[in-house]
Every structure is written in C-alpha cells, then in structure tokens.
Image: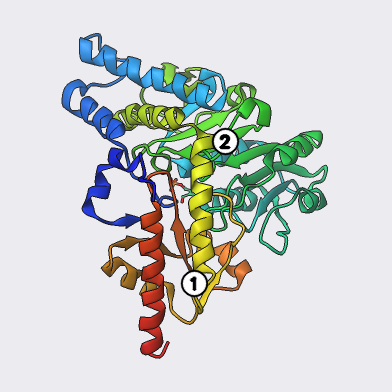
Amino acid sequence: MMKNPYSKDFPQLNNGSVYLDTAATSLKPNSVIEAVNHYNRDLSSNIHRGMYEAAVETTELYESTRETVAKFLHAKTDEIIYTRGTTSSLNLVAYAYGLENLKAGDEIIVSELEHHSSFLPWQFVAKKTGAILKFVELNEEGRITVEAFKKVLSTKTKVVALTYVSNVMGYITPMKEIISLSHQYNAICVVDAAQAVQHIEIDVTALDCDFLAFSGHKMLGPTGIGILYGKQKLLNIMEPFEYGGDMNDDVNKDISEWKTGPQKFEAGTMPIASVIGLQKAIEYIENIGLSTISEYIDKLQRYALAQLKQIEGVKIYNPTSETGIITFNIETVPSHDAISFLAEKNIAIRAGQHCAKLICDWLGIYSCLRASIYIYNSYTDVDIFIEGIKEAVAYFKKLGF
Ligand code: PLP
C-alpha cells in the first residue's frame, strides 16, 4: 500500500501512536515547530515597539502572517484580526457586535450542530438583550439545509451564527446560499470555520460572510492563535472588545482614541510565536493544496467507514460525513471506557460530547466516540484503528457489556 508522503514531516508520529484526533487539535509539521522555535530562540522581542533588529524582524513576520492569512481567505489585510482561537473570535463578535446591535424581539439563528463556542456567546447575547434564539431544524441525517433555514429566516433575523462544518457530524453547511438569503433580510452571518478551514477552500469575498472564525491549532498551526475575519465596514463601527496597550492612538484622562483596523482589537502582547507559526501552517497546507487534502481524506474516510460498518455492535451516526470525521459508539459501552481500551493500544481518538451537547441530545445519546482523519494519516493507521475497535467489541462483550 502507498506510503503516506507527509507523515515524515510530523515528528510526533515517531512516538508510534495512531493519531486520529485532528478535530480536537492537529499535529504540527517541522516547519511550524521550527518557526515557533526561531522566534523563541532567536527573536524574542515585542511587536510594533522596538527599533532593534530582532524587534523589526518580529514585527515583519507578525504582519506578513496577516497578509498570508488574508490571501488564504481572499480578504483584505485589514480585515484579519488575531485572537486566541475560534472561541475568542466568536466571543469578540458576540460582545462587540451582538450586545451593541441587538434589541428585544430581534432573532438570532443558530443550530443544534453548533459547538458551544458558536452557541453559548449568542445565548448570552439573547439573555442580555432580550433577543430570541431560533434553531434551524436539522434534516433526518442531522444536516442544516437551505429549505429548513428558509423556514426560520424572517425580517426579525439580525444574526445568523452557524457552523460551516460540524465537529461531530463532519457535514458541510450550504453556507453560500444561507448567507445570500440572510442578506436579503439584512441579517449578518457569523461563520464558525474551525473545522472547515483545513478541509475546504474559503473565499470570504465570494462567500460574502460578515464574520468568520477559526483556530490555528486545528490546521497544523500552534495553539493560542485564532483568526477573526470581519468585513471592514462592520469592524469600523465596532467598539474594542479588550482595552490596553497597543490598541490605542491617544490616551487622556477624560477620553481616549483607538487605532483603526485590526489593531483596535489586539490589545496587549499577542501570541507572537504562534502567529509566526501559523504562517508556516498555511504555507504547508497551500503547498499540498486543499483539493488534494480533501480528496485524500475522503478516500481514507471511505476506507475506514466501509470496514467500521461491518463490525457488529458498532453504531455510526454520520455515515455520509464529508470531512474525515467519523462519529460512532460501541453500543452498550460507555465512550470513555472504549477510549481507555484504545489508548492502551496507542490509538488516539476522542470520546465525550465534543463541546456540542445539543447535537448529542438530538442524536439521543449521552456521548460518543469520534475518529478524525487528516493528511498525515495512512491506510495502516485505519487498519490499526479498525483492529482496535474489533478487539474492543470482543473485550467488552466478554465482560458482559
Ligand atoms: N467550533 C468548532 C466547530 C470546533 O470544533 C471547535 C473546537 O473543537 C471550536 C469551535 C472551538 O475552537 P477553540 O477551542 O480552538 O477555540
């Protein structure tokens, strides 16, 4: 069977584990690790402040990463804000846009597919402003459809906050049609792209979304860095979310002024090393190409699903998943017992509610297992995973589960 040409770039794979937990966080390639090390080892300095060589190079790397992200998303550089991760990006929108612009009776459209970081900030905004949360009804597979979306969209809709790819079901939301419909009603669209950006090409200009959020660490980058894309006209009318150093233009006892552009939202010392690492992560993905990545993942996922379906006692919740996420249970076995068994065999998958309790409720389960495939996984990884599941089924059956 063909050898995976990318696995050699991911040193963590040398520990012999079968890593199928990319939806939680991805592994990092050498180029990302080296870029982070380069900053920590050779450049430690702050940005936008010092005039010495290291500080100048650091600022250049920090700002050129912004250009890389902007090109990657087809956005303008000034529309790219660094945050701590998807969670921070989505909270920023909820606080700085939602709290200021919504009032009692306005409606916010969400879905049961949302990760808690795409749902709870809007539940909070609804509570504070008196706005009402509306849920798109999922179809029988658990997908958001345009037809169901139309049923909840109305002149009262002010915000549409939806996941582009569900972290539990792996489905792709028909976001372009949803955004276009939302704009006909003057609603803004906030896209949670945490599980999308590493799988599908995102062109925010063509998509016409108002805000879009993702995390570096799920797309081969370091932890601690996230992106918020926001349309310039919206960012311009928003107040800062955090106040402190580097985001102000003029500070006085009575009134102070803020910088314009992304810096208005980047108060204090930012995760500089992680920003620099993110640039290398994007370059790594672009060098392979997102279409090559998704084709490969698709093949591997189909290979895994075909075998998993044959195992008696395994229930799969998303057999038509599109992005390498396979969600299932070994029936009658609590998911945490199952992952402990697999961990003994060096197979890394995740168990639990995946920070998406509403979809677990919808599925009628307390928790589930999730295997997630990415570009560094091989057919051998899938074989070992399938063998592990077979052994787990037999083991727990013997124990009387
Ligand atoms: N949205 C989705 C769909 C996710 O899968 C995750 C993380 O699992 C998040 C948001 C939150 O990302 P982070 O924890 O990096 O802020």
Is residue 275 something one can see in this rendering? yes
Answer whether labels 1 and 2 touch (C-beta < 8 Å): no
Write the residue at 26% across / 31% down: 36
Query: How many numbered callouts?
Result: 2
Residue hosting label 1: 329
Query: Disc 2 designates what residue?
Result: 212
| Nearest the eye: 371 or 206 | 371
* Secondary structure category for the residue under label 1: strand
Sequence-wise, which precedes: disc 1 or disc 2? 2
Above or below, 206 against 343 in this view is: above
Q: Which amino acid does label 1 sit on?
A: Asn
Indicate if the residue with disc 2 has its beta carbon within 8 Å of ligand 1.
no
Q: Position of residue 149 (x, y in %)?
A: 76, 50
Task: Point out residue 349 in the picture as x, y percentages from the top left corner.
Answer: 39, 61
Q: Report the disc number at residue 251.
A: none
The residue positioned 31% from the left and 32% from the top of the image is: 32
Mark 2 secondary-structure assignment: strand
Image position of 350 with respect to 221: above or below = below
Q: How crowded is mark 1: few (under 14 residues within 10 Å), some or many (20 or more)?
A: many
Of labels 1 and 2, the one closer to you:
1
Q: Residue, x 47% and y 17% (percent of image)? A: 259
Nearest the viewer among 155 and 2 is 2
- Distance from disc 1 to disc 2, alpha carbons, whole Å, reads 32 Å
User: Quadrant of residue 38 in the image?
Assistant: top left
> Considering depth in this image, is 195 or 284 the residue closer to the camera?
284
Task: Tell me if 292 is positioned left or right of 189 in this view.
Answer: left
Left or right of residue 138: residue 47: left
Q: Can you say whether 248 is above or below 110 in the image?
A: above
At label 2, which amino acid type do we have? Leu
Side of 178 relative to 117 (left or right): right
Q: Position of residue 192 (x, y in %)?
A: 56, 43
Q: How is the image coloured?
A: rainbow
